[in-house]
Image (cartoon, rainbow, N blue to C red):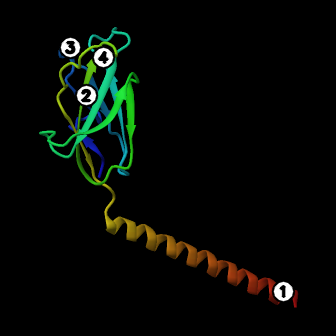
Amino acid sequence: MIVLALATVLGFAEADPGASGRPRLVVNAVGTTDGHVQLEFEASPPEAEGVQFQLEESDSLAFEQPLLRYEGAEEGSFVSGLPAGMHHYRLRQRADQDATWGPWCDPVVVTIDPHSLRTAWLLFGGGGVLVSCILGFLLLADRRVRREAS
């Protein structure tokens, strides 16, 4: 029930840690089940300036029909509104606006596993019981106050 991104014990995943000329894609996947993920980009080499990034998403590891999610110089992207299922991301970089794009980093897989319908109904039912108890308490208290007033 937690979003997993090539799950690790620490709760985050990395793609391509340190491959030469390839950027690094880090996914922080701690405790989200509601369809959003924070992606962080690291240029290679890390001290490079003016680097542009391109992030793609696909529903398959082969990236047959990729969706361009981001292109620019920011070092991260927040992706929201993801439906349940597996989402694949990859990242590449270029030195500046006029340079050609470098190679893609290894893909990162993010799995969105939202709360089950059973959990939703249990929470809804528990809320209904709580509201009923509060209303019952208020009605009893109102009766008592009216008796004492008359």
Farthest residue, direction right: 150
| Cα–Cα gap, marks 2 and 4 | 10 Å
State the image coordinates of residue 55 (x, y, percent, origin top left).
29, 31
- Which residue matches tag 3? 21
- Which residue matches tag 1? 148
Numbered disc 3: secondary structure: loop
- Which residue matches tag 2? 91
Mark with earlier residue (3, 1): 3
Q: Which amino acid does label 2 sit on?
A: Leu
The image shows residue 104, relative to residue 86, as above or below, that is above
Among the 4 quarters of the image, the one containing residue 52 = top left
- Which residue matches tag 4? 43
* Point 21% across, 21% down: residue: 17
Mark with earlier residue (1, 2): 2
Of circles 3 and 1, which is in front? 3
* Point 20% across, 37% down: residue: 6
